[in-house]
Amino acid sequence: MNHFYRLYRPATAVPHRNDSTYTEITPCSALRPYIKCFWGSVGPSAAKATAGELIIPDTCMDIIFEINHSQNSMKSRFVGINNEAFFSAGSTEEKDTSPPFGIRFFAWSAAMFSQDSMNGVKNKVFDVQYHYEAIKTALEPILYEVTDIHARAREAEKILLRRLDSARHKPVLDAAIGALLARKGNIRTTSLADEVFLSTRQLERLFADYTGVSPKQLSSLVRYQYLWHDILTEDSFHPANAVHKYGYTDQSHLLHDFKRYHTLLPAQAKDYALKKAEKKVVYNTSQIPRRRIRHTAGFMSQNYNTKYVRRLIIILYIKRFRQASYRSSSKTRRKYYAVRKTIFTNKDMGIPECQRN
């Protein structure tokens, strides 16, 4: 069993989003080396809400299910690894459609649940039955009955644990992926082949069968994902500082490579992620103790207080991920910290647990 998930955490274009339109659920410990997450939504309108959103290469493969109860039909798709960014089309169903449910595999683990080769799946979409017929047959009747995403994830875990084919496990592939991740994608195919005692051609065949891409392509995608992680987490990221770290020839090479996968420059990509995450955050302000906050922070009225608290919560959400700083007058800052203390010490605010410090 590998532990690559501890070294490498690929991110989407909006990695901080976790609301009614998109939720990720971490799998059990036995499946964590193979599956990044289960994902879906809590409302049938979520697919339309997420239409037109940027999808970037995340070195993963997805199985996606959508059920239309009025037509008693299911749409299922297997999305292979992609090395191109695109915009999602959303769902074509308008009503009586259950929330979508997805299983996201790490690229090097998808073949462990299928008897088929992953060669030829890059940038393509298939019906699930062509690669995961047994999983579809077992999971489909459950998805018709169960609509809660957490219950769906638990049922999917049982099926995947039964379908996990240990015979498909290749220690040499683990060694190659481990070396690739340890170098953060900054490694040549010839050097990688030497480390795992294979010829270049043997290594390319192995990667094609299990990941759908060549070692060179996967290395480039992994390097891009590590770079994207730095952009998201560093307060003052500058491309020049990452040139040597990731083995680029110069700054223009780095920017060109990033834009090729993301369609945006680093600063634009970070702004896009923040705006989308902020836009999707929905809070239940009906349970906010207005009078308590008004007396604590010294507001003049409860109506003004409610609008102010909404804005502060959004600021706190961004601040939590160290993506922005709050600058204002000393009087406003005093109110800010007073409201902050009141909000995060009250458990009946209607604010998701993950948003509290």
Image: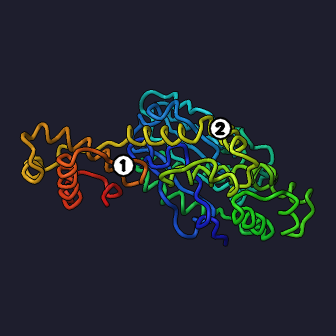
* Rendering coords of residue 192 (x, y %): 83, 63
Point out the frontmost of discs 1 and 2.
1
Horizontally, residue 145 falls left or right of residue 224, namely left
Corner quadrant of residue 187: bottom right
Residue tagged by mark 1?
Answer: 325
* Rendering coords of residue 226 (x, y %): 62, 55
Which one is nearer the viewer's eye here, 158 or 287? 287
> Please, is residue 68 above or below residue 240 in the view?
above
* Rendering coords of residue 249 (x, y %): 76, 48
Write the residue at 52% across / 66% down: 28
Horizontally, residue 348 falls left or right of residue 322, namely left
Write the residue at 50% across / 38% down: 67
Mark 2, other Cα within 10 Å: few <14 / some 14–19 / many ≥20 = some
The count of marks equals 2
**C-alpha separation, residue under disc 1 versus residue under disc 2:** 26 Å
Residue 73 is marked as none
Write the residue at 59% across / 54% down: 10
Could you tell me the amino acid type at mark 2?
A: Lys
Q: What kind of element bears circle 1?
A: loop
Q: Are marks 1 and 2 in contact (CB under 8 Å)?
A: no
Write the residue at 64% across / 66% down: 4
Residue tagged by mark 2?
Answer: 259
Could you tell me the amino acid type at mark 1?
A: Ser
Which one is nearer the viewer's eye here, 352 or 121? 352
Which one is nearer the viewer's eye here, 343 or 86? 343
> Please, is residue 265 above or below residue 356 in the view?
above
Horizontally, residue 59 falls left or right of residue 87, namely right
Q: What kind of element bears circle 2?
A: helix
> Please, is residue 195 above or below residue 78 in the view?
below
* Rendering coords of residue 297 (x, y %): 12, 51
Question: Which numbered disc, 1 or 2, marks the residue that appears first in the sequence?
Answer: 2
Mark 1, other Cα within 10 Å: few <14 / some 14–19 / many ≥20 = few
